[in-house]
Amino acid sequence: QVQLAESGGGLVQAGGSLTLSCEASGRIFIINDMAWYRQAPGKQRELVAIITSDFRSTYSDSVKGRFTISRDNAKNTVSLHLDSLKPEDTAVYYCNAEVTVSLIARVYWGQGTQVTVSS
C-alpha cells in the first residue's frame, strides 16, 4: 500500500504565498507523474500542476506564472509553491501520484489540505 501525506495548507491574505508538500511512503517501486489538484466548494476537482519523473511540468492556465511544482525523487516528495495568491485559489488541495508497485501502476491520492485566501 502507498500513502500520500500532505502538509502546508493554511490561511493567507491575498497576494501572499504558501508552500504545500506531499510525501509518498509505503511499497514504492517507481513514482511516475506527481501532481496537485484542487477542489473549491461546489466545483469539480481540477488539475493545478503536474510534474513527470524527469521533471517536466505543466500548469493550468489559472495558476501559470504564480505556482511552481517541484519534486525530489530521492525523498519521494512533491511540493507546490503558491505565490501571488488570490481569493479564487481557495480550495482543498490534493496530492496525486502514479506509483508502480510490482509492475502495476496505480494512482494514489492524499487526504487534502485546505488553502484559504482572504481578500
Image (cartoon, rainbow, N blue to C red):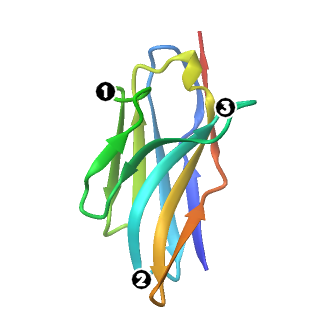
Percent position (x, y) of residue 32? 38, 68
Q: CA distance from mark 1 to mark 2?
A: 32 Å
Identify the residue position indicated by label 3 in the image.
40
Mark 3–mark 2 CB contact (< 8 Å): no
**Does the rendering let one see residue 68?**
yes
47 to the left or right of 29: right
Give amino acid for label 1: Gly
Label annotation for residue 29: 2
Q: Is residue 104 above or below residue 119?
A: below
Q: Is residue 55 above or below residue 83?
A: below
* 57 or 11, nearer to the observer: 57
Label annotation for residue 48: none
* 114 or 101, nearer to the observer: 101
Q: Earlier along the polypeptide chain: callout 1 or callout 2?
A: 2
**Does the rendering let one see residue 115?**
no
Which residue appears farthest toward the bottom when viewing the image? 102
Which residue appears farthest toward the right when viewing the image? 42
Percent position (x, y) of residue 57? 30, 48
Identify the residue position indicated by label 1 in the image.
65
